[in-house]
Every structure is written in C-alpha cells, then in structure tokens.
Image: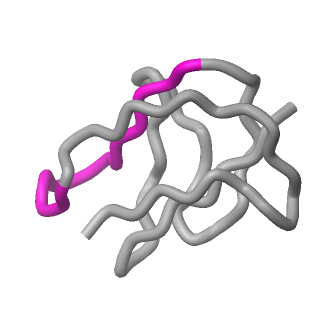
C-alpha cells in the first residue's frame, strides 16, 4: 500500500479515480500506481484534478497533494 496526504482549507471528501478515498487533511491509503485526484462538493478549488503516480511512500512521508 501507498500513502497520500491531500490538503485543502476545509474538510472535503477526496476522490481517487472517481471513487471516495477519504477526507482531506489526513493521510490516506491507496494502491500503488497512477491515480486522478479531485475533491467532492463545490468546484471552488484549483487545480480541478491532480494526476499522479503514487509509489515509494510511507506513513511519515506520504505523497502530498494540495488543492487551493
């Protein structure tokens, strides 16, 4: 398993490949590989989607994604 940390100014549902992954501002588990990340709710964030290859992460060094 791999780890991602998705940050945003408020709590939102994180979508990975269109499926619910978890909540923002928490370390989340995901399978290794290429994924597309977005937030659920109003489209008041940028960028609209983040594409990333997630590999070689740890709980203390997750892949970091920031939505503004």
Q: Is residue 31 left or right of residue 25?
A: right
Q: Nearer the viewer, residue 23 or 62?
A: 62
Q: The C terminus appears in which quarter of the rendering?
A: bottom left
Q: Position of residue 64 (x, y in %)?
A: 56, 59
Task: Identify the residue at image location x=47%, y=56%.
Answer: 65
Q: Is residue 9 left or right of residue 25?
A: left
In the displayed image of the protein, which residue is found farthest to the bottom? 9
Q: Position of residue 41 (x, y in %)?
A: 25, 52
Is residue 38 in the magenta section?
yes
Relative to 51, does residue 25 appear above or below in the rendering?
Answer: below
Give the mark count: 0
Task: Identify the residue at image location x=54%, y=20%.
Answer: 34
Q: Nearer the viewer, residue 9 or 59?
A: 59
Instruction: Tell me which corner region of the image, top left, top right, bottom left or bottom right, holds residue 60.
Output: bottom right
Q: The N terminus appears in which quarter of the rendering?
A: top right
Q: Nearer the viewer, residue 5 or 21?
A: 5
Q: Position of residue 58 (x, y in %)?
A: 87, 52
Task: Identify the residue at image location x=32%, y=62%.
Answer: 67
Magenta segment: 34-46
């Amino acid at each position: 398993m791999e780890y991602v940390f998705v940050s945003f100014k408020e709590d939102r549902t994180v979508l990975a490949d269109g499926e619910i992954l978890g909540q923002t501002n928490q370390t989340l588990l995901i399978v290794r590989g290429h994924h597309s990340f977005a937030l659920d709710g109003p489209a008041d964030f940028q960028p609209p989607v983040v594409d990333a290859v997630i590999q070689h992460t740890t709980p203390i060094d997750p892949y970091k994604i920031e939505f503004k």
